Image (tube, rainbow, N blue to C red):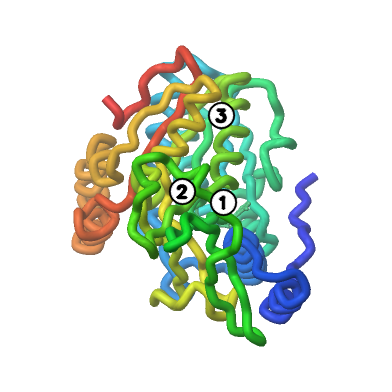
Amino acid sequence: MTDLTIPSPEPLLPERLARAITLGGPIPLSQFMAAANAHYYGTRDPLGTRGDFTTAPEISQMFGELVGAWIADLAARAGVENSRYVEFGPGRGTLAADALRVLGKAGMRPAVHFVENSATLRSAQAERVPDAEWHLDLVGVPEDGPMLVVANEFFDALPIRQLIATGEGWRERLVACQDTLFLPVAGDRGFDMIIPKHLREAAPGSILETSPASVAVLRGLAARLEKQGGAALIIDYGYEGPAIGDTLQAVRGHQYANPFDAPGEADLTAHVDFGTLKEAAEVEGLVVHGPVSQGAFLKALGIEARTEALARVAPDRAEQLAADRDRLIGDQAMGELFKVMAVTAQGWPVPAGFA
Ligand code: SAH
């Protein structure tokens, strides 16, 4: 039985956060970000031209189709028959629908499991992929048989902590408030002991981000892949860190906003540290491929030929198809900023796009 119900977040998030801070003192940025995003995603569908932001699968069906082809090729070469399609944060379900269509043509009909904590987005996903099963994490996903996992723009939405260099050493960046005006402050506790050696002498004001939540999710996923076989494809904007830099950003109505204004009303994200995720996967015994740029990955999978094939069938759409392709792979668009990393269980073939 499909159960789409999750309690909707309570209204008045700023008031609730302000009360918590007034009573208990400044809170870690991770707590602020987790509360803001749970409210944000739980109360709306943020995607598309009328929403706050657009993602690759919403730009073009080619994105999900190429991901589907990537999975079909890998599963065939790995010789698996009974696998599961698992997607983290599937948004509107567009990527899954496009990928599953291609898998169907390749004769694969995997059971579909979505890890999603927004009731609103679960409904949108159910319209496109009615047979899916929904989960809050991997615990309920069956442990038999390989998993083929996709996560596009999922890890960037998970909470980060920030450490800031001050004249008195490294401190955690906390969120304080005056009434319901929120602002970052440096905490009292010293954190020098967890700063990588080569970054310890950074100039005051330097910021180092970590995402314990992302590492925990990735390690949990990696442990399951190691046990039951399979692969995961992780796509997001990011860098190979740890590195100095403040990447926390808020997007509202396709514009950047102050991340501390109106918590729960803007999408809060941070760039993904692929270096740290890579290490986390390796600790669990997985093989890591990449990261490579999204542009290089989609070109290796044949996005150019796919664009031409679609344009031949629908010549009146040729210009739009070429524009969409350029948004996905262009150096000044998503092609360079977005990275693609795959992790596979030991003994699995090298996936396409990472040769
Ligand atoms: N992958 C989609 C949507 C990206 S937006 C696309 O490319 O279009 C981020 C997605 O992750 C949303 O579906 C959001 O509800 C989900 N999400 C964010 N934080 C989550 C969490 N902690 N647990 C489960 N899902 C989460």
The residue wearing badge 1 is: 89
**Would you call the spot at circle 1 few (<14 residues within 10 Å), some (14-19), or many (20 or more)?**
many
Q: Is mark 1 within 8 Å of ligand 1?
A: yes
Q: Earlier in the sequence, mark 3 or mark 2?
A: 2
Residue 148 position within the rendered picture, expressed as x and y whole percent measured from the top left: 53, 31
Q: Earlier in the sequence, mark 3 or mark 1?
A: 1
The residue positioned 44% from the left and 77% from the top of the image is 257
| Three-letter code, disc 3 | Ala
Helix, strand or loop under label 3: helix
Q: In the rendered structure, are the residues bearing label 1 and label 2 in contact, judged by CB atoms less than 8 Å apart?
A: yes
Residue 24 or residue 240, whichever sits in front: 24
Q: Quadrant of residue 256?
A: bottom left
Q: What distance separates the C-alpha of mark 3 from that of mark 1? A: 17 Å
**Would you call the spot at circle 2 few (<14 residues within 10 Å), some (14-19), or many (20 or more)?**
many
| Three-letter code, disc 2 | Asn
The residue positioned 53% from the left and 80% from the top of the image is 261
| Three-letter code, disc 1 | Gly
Q: Is mark 2 within 8 Å of ligand 1?
A: yes
Single out the mark in the foreground, 3 or 1: 3
The residue wearing badge 2 is: 152
The residue wearing badge 3 is: 222
Q: Is residue 151 above or below residue 351?
A: below
Q: What distance separates the C-alpha of mark 1 from that of mark 2? A: 8 Å
